[in-house]
Amino acid sequence: MCGIDIDELELEAEVENLPTVQLFVDKHLNDAKCPSKIQKQINVAVEEIFVNIASYAYAPATGMVILKLEMNRELDKISLSFIDKGIPYDPLKNKEPDITLPAEEREIGGLGIFLVKQTMDEVHYEHKDGQNILTIAKAFGIK
Amino acid sequence: MKIDKQENGNELVISLAGRLDTITAPELEEQLASGLEDKEKLTFDMEKLEYISSAGLRVLLSAQKKMSKKGGMIVKNVSEEVMEIFEVTGFADILVIE
């Protein structure tokens, strides 16, 4: 188990908690000396997923979300799972936006999860024990 | 995020600094809702913009749609990180980037 850090954050799925979530993730990425470019990609992915959960998982009520973080210091790889007990919902099944359309025909929205899929190495969804579990992973090392 | 507006006649130049994300995008949306009526041209200076997410892209797209019927919209001084997001989402093709 040497070289793997595990951390967890549980908080209310509210958009205003986004900075707390980013600080939690950034702390681990900074400790692991993640390159700034990849850190921004991970920040964007974290925002898109967290905001989705905050906006839809428990709407119109609210609920908790758990972030499970695993930092593999040997491989320089971060895995993050977002766990909520809201409405079962697989965001990966959404229709992908057509990014070749001109501006006038572009729809506003649908880009968030698309961005996550494009920038992360792994994106995985499962519904288990009444929970939505969305996991992303990204390697950032040059090893 | 810091939003700095400069008016030159019928042109509006907006300089953005910091993060254009879910929390800050509504501020920009609000500024654009009232500030564009008498403007023919809109320029975004993104030299100090470090971060953009889909919430920011939405505001830019909506501004682009408004301005395309008039004198147009230009985005300049885009950082490498922000440019990558523009490229991945196809925004690099629909925005006029200088």
Image (cartoon, coloured by chain):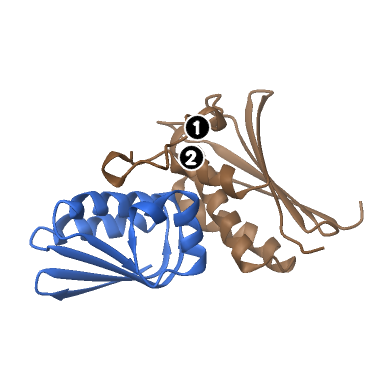
Chain colours: A brown, B blue
Question: Mark 1 falls within which chain?
Answer: A
Q: Please tell me whether mark 2 sits on a helix, a strand or a loop.
A: helix
Please state which of the two labelled residues, at mark 2 or mark 1, is closer to the viewer. 2
Name the residue at 25% across, 67% down: B43
Which residue: 60% across, 55% down?
Answer: A42
Give residue B44's quadrant in the image. bottom left
Whether residue A13 can be seen here: no
| Mark-to-mark CA distance, 2 and 1 | 7 Å
Judge whether B93 appears above or below B42 on screen: above
What is the residue that sits farthest to the right in this orientation? A2
A34 displayed left or right of B21: right
Residue B84: give x, y in percent of width and height.
Answer: 51, 59
Q: Residue at x 43, y 49 (%)?
A: B90
* Secondary structure found at label 1: helix
Residue named by callout 2 = A52
Kindly identify the amino acid type of the residue bearing the numbered disc 1: Ala
A87 relative position to A105: left or right: right
Q: Earlier in the sequence, mark 2 or mark 1?
A: 2
Quadrant of res B27 = bottom left
Give the number of the disc on residue A73: none
**Residue A11, image x, y percentages:** 58, 46
Q: In which quarter of the image is the C terminus of chain B?
A: bottom left
Query: Mark 2 and 1 residues: CB-CB less than 8 Å, in contact?
Result: yes
Q: In this view, does A71 lie to the left or right of A20?
A: right
Residues beneath discs 2 and 1 located on the same chain: yes
